[in-house]
Amino acid sequence: MIACCLNLTDAVDRIGATFDSDRQAGELNAWGNSYPAEELPFGGQVLVGGVRYALVRKSPGGPSRPDHIEALGQRLAGDPLGRPVEALALLAAGEMGPQELSVRVHLASGGDDIGPAIGRGSGPGIVVRSATIPGWLIRPEAPTSPDQLRCRHLHYPGDYGLALLVPVLWSRVLPLPGLPVTAIELAPSPLVHVFAISLLAGVGS
Amino acid sequence: MTAWTPSVSTLYRNVEVLAAARSPRSYSLRLGMSWGFGLPNDGRSNFTEFSFPLRPAGDLPDLLRRRGGLDIRRHDDPSGVTMHEYLHVTGEPVVAVVDSFYLPYRPAYGRVHSSRTIIAGPAEGDRVWVDDCWEPTYRGLLRRRDLDAARWSRAEADPLLEPIFSDVQTDAEWFTVSVEPLLINDPARWAATTIRLLVHEMTTAVRTVGASFGLAALREMVGVLAEGGDAPWRVVSRRTMALVLRAELSSRRYLCTLLRNAVTLAGHPSLIDDVNLYQEGLWHFQAARDVLVKSLRHGCAEYDKFVVTRCRDALSNEERLLAAIEAAGLPAAPLPEEAAEAWPA
């Protein structure tokens, strides 16, 4: 499987992970909790559920900077090389429990010819895909699964970390019709936090 | 049966647990015996995580007792020993209001003031059995002195660490739950009457000095939110609005169970699909509630737009179910006067 990891550097708008030196900067939820940045591969790549994802750069020291996208209707550029895409993959989590995310995917051409088995978007060359994004906090004893990127503890804004609940990022793969993707729109769903997006080809291989 | 169910407040959840032990077959129906909407507009700030929905005819527990024989009784405890004496004498668990700051098993222990309810059972020596449904959940023993400290806390306001559930003077408040027998001679008539009563409650517009009620109040809320900017929050604060929705959503979870049973008994099982659709549509209320909570820490225009849209869809969801019930043409049944509503034996 080939993954085109989208560069989200210019799109990130929220601080979901904090280093130990800056826990009070967390804004993943109303209580200021956050992922422990030391445990996530910021600036690198990671394989979750067989999908390769790239996280934005994030360095310790100094004030924390945004590291992910809160789904608020953003439009993101697709694969600049225009390769056919068979699936859209998200590394994301729901705030306050599981959340629905709807994505409008703009296709380079042939959108009008998409078969009836595939959900149509509102307009030529657009398909809409939806996914349930599981909640970001689970109990440590909850079963592990390949689609999880699980941390070992949770950061609190009171400048401490505990492992009574642990934060997780989830991989979700949404099938696409195998056409080049020019843009992706995240429907407004402020309780969905997207840390990485990859466009996949050769999914069946 | 629809898969998605809304989350509920700790008080509703804990009352459900205690009522289920006493009336396993009907507890959920009895908790759903109200369909209304109460919107405060007097600037009150005393809503809590464990508040009941506002109703014009008095408090909601009184409605539930008169309509379904479910007696949720609130008690003060000025001496600090009344609840413990009750537990000792009756052996029956109760619901206690607590501040998590004093509960050693909680992440917030010693750090964050946050008020909600737990179930407390009889003591074993100097320890009390408790059931705390808040994640991470806990069932086990708790030192009585910790429980007492949690019951008497001021839960000081802490907008940064606890923007919604703090600043609650608990005064060792506690609740008992008892269930009276429910005698129904004519289930079909009871069901039709109940549905009519609930529809009447929801569609009757009532205004008092401090609040408005019914579908009209929900429309009013959507209208106020649609004004945008700071205008809505001058009428009802974000925090209060989130807590109002929390209470209304909790009540509706059980309303759905009641309605599914009632429409079947009334001879209109096809309405179950409408009730299931309605239950799915309660997601709009929940999403609005949760984004309102989120906005307490970081407000932004996109959040407010989302909340307006969700509340508008929640209103449509209520109207759709009312229209479906009306279209079904349920048999005419006398509307019981609240005072004479003596279904419980």
Image (spheres, coloured by chain):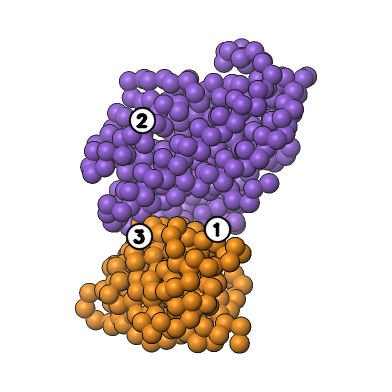
Chain colours: A orange, B purple
Residue annotated with mark 3 = A72
Could you say where residue B42 lies in the image, as x and y percent from the top left? 29, 28
Q: Which label sits in the foreground, 1 or 2?
A: 2
Name the residue: 51% across, 38% down: B317
Could you say where residue B215 lies in the image, as x and y percent from the top left? 45, 28
* Chain on which label 3 sits: A
Q: Secondary structure at mark 1?
A: loop
* Chain on which label 2 sits: B
Q: Residue B137, which numbered label?
A: 1
Residue annotated with mark 2 = B220
Q: Secondary structure at mark 3?
A: loop
Can the viewer see residue A40 in this picture?
yes
Foreground of the two, B293 or A73: A73
Name the residue: 36% across, 50% down: B306
Amino acid carrying mark 3 in the image: Leu
The vertical placement of A49 against B120, above or below, is below
Going from N to C along the chain, the mark reached first, 1 or 2, is 1
Foreground of the two, B202 or B312: B312
Q: Are the numbered discs 3 and 1 placed on the same chain, yes or no?
A: no
Q: Residue B277, which numbered label?
A: none
Name the residue: 56% across, 46% down: B280
Mark 3 crowd level (few <14, some 14–19, many ≥20, 10 Å Cα): some
Q: CA distance from mark 1 to mark 2?
A: 37 Å
Q: Secondary structure at mark 2?
A: helix
Q: Are marks 3 and 1 in contact (CB under 8 Å)?
A: no
Mark 2 crowd level (few <14, some 14–19, many ≥20, 10 Å Cα): some
Name the residue: 36% across, 36% down: B222
Mark 1 crowd level (few <14, some 14–19, many ≥20, 10 Å Cα): few
Can the viewer see residue B163 in this picture?
no
Amino acid carrying mark 1 in the image: Thr
Looking at the rendered structure, the number of numbered marks drawn on it comes to 3
Q: In the rendered image, which quarter contains the C terminus of chain B? A: top right
